[in-house]
Amino acid sequence: MKFDPRVTTYADLAEHAAKRECAQPIFACNEAQLVTAKEYSTAVKKRGKGKIRWVKDNKYYMGQGALKYLPVTKTQATRINADLSHANHWLSPSQRALLKKIKANPKAPWPNAVGKPFARAWQAAMKVK
C-alpha cells in the first residue's frame, strides 16, 4: 500500500492499522511518523531509506518448518509469513492443536499444505494418524 497524505493523515492510517491488526509492525518513514505510530502500537519500526523489496513467494518462510504441514488460508499464510514469531496469533484453536500434534509427531507422513486449498489440506491432515 502506498500512503498518500492528500487522502488521509498518517495518524488515521496508523490508528486504523492498529485497530484492525493489519500492520504488524507499523512502519514510520520519519521521526514525526515514529512518534505518531507509537501512540497506536508497540510494534513500530522506522523504515530505512532503501527500496522496498517485494517478496516473490509470500509463503517462503512457512515452507521451512512444521508450519508447511499446517492448513491455513491465503490471508493467514501472508500474515504468518510476514511475522513468523507471532504465527499463533493468526491461527484458530483447532489449527493450534493440529500444529502442536504436527510438532509432537514430526516423523508422521504429514502432507505439505503450502499453497493448497484450505479444505483439501485440512482433510488430508486429518487422515494422518
Image: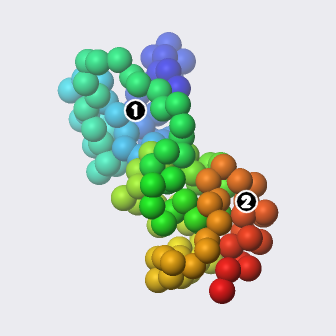
Residue at the (34%, 34%) spot, across then down: 27
Instruction: Examine the rendered structure and indicate whether residue 96 appears above or below residue 65.
Output: below
**Amino acid under disc 2:** Phe
- Choose between 88 and 115: the one closer to the eye: 115
Tell me where residue 121 sits by quadrant.
bottom right
Colour mapping used in the image: rainbow
* Element marked by disc 2: helix
On-image quarter of the C terminus: bottom right
- N-terminal of the two: label 2 or label 1? 1
* Element marked by disc 1: helix
- Where residue 11 is drawn, which disc sits there? 1
Q: How many marks?
A: 2
Horizontal arrangement in the rendering, residue 112 relative to residue 43 (left or right): right
Residue at the (52%, 26%) spot, across then down: 1
- Residue 51 is situated, as x and y percent measured from the top left of the image, at 35, 17
Residue 27 visible in the displayed image: yes
Residue at the (65%, 66%) spot, across then down: 111
Residue at the (74%, 70%) spot, across then down: 124
| Crowd rating for badge 2 (residues with CA inside 10 Å; few <14, some 14–19, many 20+) | some
Instruction: Examine the rendered structure and indicate whether residue 69 appears above or below residue 55.
Output: below
Q: Residue pushed farthest bottom?
A: 129
- Residue 74 is situated, as x and y percent measured from the top left of the image, at 65, 49
Residue 72 visible in the displayed image: no
- Choose between 50 and 116: the one closer to the eye: 116
- Residue 25 is situated, as x and y percent measured from the top left of the image, at 37, 44
- Residue 20 is situated, as x and y percent measured from the top left of the image, at 53, 49
Does the CB distance between marks 2 and 1 fall below 8 Å?
Answer: no
Which residue is labeled 2 in the image? 118
Horizontal arrangement in the rendering, residue 43 relative to residue 19 (left or right): left
**Amino acid under disc 1:** Ala
